[in-house]
Image (tube, coloured by chain):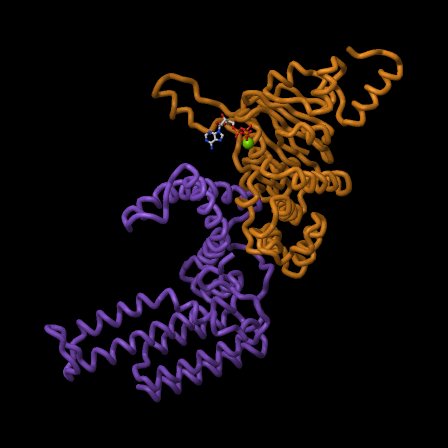
Amino acid sequence: MIEVKNVTFSYYEESETDTKNNEPVPVALENVSLHISEGEFVSIVGRNGSGKSTLAKLLNGLIVPKTGVVTVAGMDTVNDETIFDVRKTVGMVFQNPDNQIIGTTVEEDVAFGPENLGVPTEEMHKIVAEAIETVGLTKFSKTEPHLLSGGQKQRAAIAGVIAMRPKCIVLDESTAMLDPIGRREVMSVIEKLNREEGITVILITHHMDEVAMTGRSILMNDGKISFDGTPRELFSNTKLVHDSGLELPQPAYLMELLGLDTGIISPEEAADKIASMLRGGNHVS
Amino acid sequence: MKPAIGQYIPGNSFLHRTDPRIKILMTVIYMVAIMFIDSFIGYAASGAVLVAAVIASRLSPIYVLKSVKPLIFLILLTIVLNIFFYGGETLWAQFWIIKIYKEAILFSVKMALRILILVAGASLLTFTTSSIALTDGLERLMSPLEFIHFPAHDIAMMMSIALRFIPIFSDEATRIMDAQKSRGAEFDTGGLIKKVKGLVPIIIPLIVSAFRRAEDLASAMEARCYRGGKGRTRFKVLKFTWRDPLAFAIITALLVCIIVFSL
Ligand SMILES: Nc1ncnc2c1ncn2[C@@H]1O[C@H](COP(=O)(O)OP(=O)(O)OP(=O)(O)O)[C@@H](O)[C@H]1O
Ligand SMILES: [Mg+2]
């Protein structure tokens, strides 16, 4: 559904830095290729400045590649004629909840996308109410955004995206500013969207326990993809995880300390493995 | 939270339910009328219209009184300046070189009344109209001007975004102030100059953050297919009800009478 082919991107023009001190232009992404199919739940991890947000913005044409192509459902993102279809297909939720809510009440904000798409008013009311219900904010429809909690604000932002009926949602560190409860609220909403509505979800995060909830994990390092596989495979490669400035999720970390296989994704799994070892009489030193 | 100036006070009164376009128009006509009125009878009559409107809004008159409170200094200043400099013919009193004329007193009292009625009328509009309705109404009223390329939609969008960010910035200002205070900054001591200087370390970070927020917001709007007012449909549709022509007719008739009688 999303196809990224040999994409290189830089925030600077070739001419800007070249002339001054012959240093190469800093590139945010270098020769990145990636295919994401419909219905996938993908996490993207990597240290600060590794190019995750840059990649995200390329996926809905907020920025376009210097070289290479990004296509969404067959539409090239450099094509101005289909750019709004691209953005409608790939919705985006950002990090700071305060800086992405445009409307003066929750329902007004959720309606912002459909308004821009020219959806007729009557239909819009239905779509907006549905979207708000999906994220569980019906009680807060007429509430002003600044009166909501962080988790509620991000859920409102998600409702604003799903009101545009996207096939894919990109969340760029959307849980980073939330407390554990807010994070859980948001994660359960996006998990539900992926499972029940079959929406493709691309989740950029620094929280490894969120990575464990996804089906596929992509690791970015210095503008390049250095790993693409299941979270289980990622966690079993402890060297790669540590070298990329990441930490294992806590259950996997425990397994690492115990000198066991770190390819687990839930505390229950860790508990089972440890218990069966103990039962088997294999003493762990 | 303390209510900001002219903040919306939710309600369900006649005035609350009147179409924002009508309310804006009425307020404008009212303000223009006040500018024309030049007699105490006229002021009394327009004051009575205001009182009637407050009653129709079912708001406590205290709100309206509070809204003019910050103006008392300005009004006193106008009165004093006018008394000293307006001049006139009928001398009422003289202290040393200061001469006080009857005309000057009358003029400054009228001026004060004008300011009071204007502000009270305008705040009644914002008390009974939510910011959404207000910007929506303004956009509709200005939309005929789009034929001459007047950016009605953009102005309304700017206003509603500005209104939405006021609470965010005021929270942020408080946070920055606390942060500076914890580093030993003092804001409420010292003279005026010191106080103003003390504001700099608050305003600079606030402006920096405003630009960052603006950039984020622009991306968020673009990501949600914003492309200006073209081809945009509306979630909220304004509809006239029987209240609207009625309110409009009554106020206009009243004001015409007042102007005619007081000229
Ligand atoms: N607007 C910009 N102008 C110039 N350089 C930028 C801009 N945005 C990002 N960069 C640079 O591009 C590189 C990749 O940044 P990007 O924001 O994609 O990283 P990230 O993985 O999202 O990091 P984080 O985890 O901090 O969000 C970094 O070296 C960064 O300094
Ligand atoms: Mg980022």
Evaluate whether residue A134 shows in this view.
Answer: yes
x and y, in percent, of residue A92 in the image: 60, 40
Q: Give the quadrant of residue A268.
A: top right
- Considering only vertical position in the picture, is B111 above or below B142? below
Please name whichever residue, B48 or A68, is drawn nearer the observer in this view of the structure: B48
Q: Residue, x 56% and y 33% (percent of image)? A: A58
- Considering only vertical position in the picture, is A62 above or below B79? above
Please name whichever residue, B102 or A40, is drawn nearer the observer in this view of the structure: B102
- Considering only vertical position in the picture, is B221 above or below A125? above
Horizontally, is A75 left or right of A63 in the view?
right
Q: Give the quadrant of residue A266.
A: top right
- Considering only vertical position in the picture, is A25 above or below A40? above
**Quadrant where the C terminus of chain B lies?**
bottom left
- Chain identifier, colour orange: A
Please name whichever residue, B5 or A9, is drawn nearer the observer in this view of the structure: B5
x and y, in percent, of residue A69 in the image: 58, 29
Chain B display color: purple
Horizontally, is A283 left or right of B228 in the view?
right
Horizontally, is B15 left or right of B71 in the view?
right
Residue reaching furthest to the left: B97
Evaluate whether residue A168 shows in this view.
Answer: no
